[in-house]
Image (cartoon, helix red, strand yellow):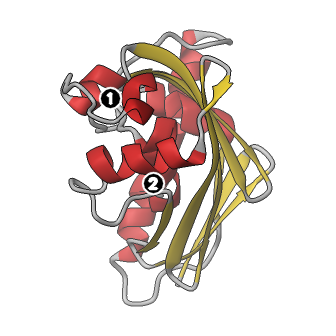
Amino acid sequence: MRVLLSTFLLLGSATLLSQQTPPPASGTQAMYDAQANSCQRKFDHIRQNGSKTKPDQTPTVFSESEINAWLSSGNAQLPQGVKKLQLRGEPGIIHATAYVDFDAVTASKRPGNPLLYMFRGTHEVQASAHASGNAGQGQVHIDSVSIDGVSVPRVALEYFAEKYITPKHPDIGIDSQFALPNRVDTATVGDRKLTVTQK
């Protein structure tokens, strides 16, 4: 879970996410609600299983559609800044697209460095990151970020994270490593799915 959350937190030059509820992209409302509820039950199972002395090691598999439905359902308690988040997974990589209100992230402070002027207003942001969890440790590496289709220079991305994100979240940056919660041993991003094992 933290692998995904850290990727979300890093989306858009390590920006933060808000609790927004866009309408489902496809399917009936009942199917959409069922996917969000299924995802929530799996999160609940991981928390309950992690409290056991010997957790069940049967993998818990989240589908991409379940995760996207859950994020859009209002169940996710996430900070302000991002709307209409959509995720797509491929082996070892998470791709994310969202509309980011950079003024909400920066508290509308005027940037002193010209590199930060691109991080103003609300824009479509796309980000790709390598993400994995192994032996109880999660790792996220942001590969690329673009704003309105324009690639963000690495130096600007790093400067933005250092100025606005890392001071509030010391364990979050362009490259992040952290302990996985709830006795999660591995977290593997696959083709449109995430597989979690506990130990």
SS state under label 1:
loop
Position above or below: 46 against 19 = below
Residue at mark 2 to residue at mark 1: CA–CA distance = 14 Å
Q: Position of residue 97 (x, y in %)?
A: 60, 27
The residue drawn where x is 56% and y is 32% is: 68
Camera-nearest residue between 108 and 134: 108
Q: Residues within 10 Å of mark 2 (few under 14, many from 20)?
A: many
Residue under pointer 2:
6
Q: Are marks 2 and 1 in contact (CB under 8 Å)?
A: no
Camera-nearest residue between 15 and 56: 15
Camera-nearest residue between 90 and 21: 90
Position above or below: 46 against 153 = below
Camera-nearest residue between 3 and 71: 3
Residue under pointer 1:
18
Q: Residues within 10 Å of mark 1 (few under 14, many from 20)?
A: many
Q: Position of residue 84 (x, y in %)?
A: 49, 19
SS state under label 2:
helix
Q: Which amino acid type is shown beneath numbered disc 2? A: Ser
Q: Is residue 37 visible?
A: no
Q: Which amino acid type is shown beneath numbered disc 1? A: Ser
Q: Position of residue 41 (x, y in %)?
A: 46, 48
| Direction bottom: furthest residue | 53
- Disc with the residue nearer the chain's start (2 vs 1): 2
Q: Is residue 74 visible?
A: yes
In this image, 175 relative to 47: left or right? right
Q: Position of residue 57 (x, y in %)?
A: 59, 79
The residue drawn where x is 22% and y is 56% is: 167
Q: Which mark is residue 171?
A: none
In this image, 37 relative to 164: left or right? right
The residue drawn where x is 65% and y is 68% is: 59
The residue drawn where x is 59% and y is 60% is: 141
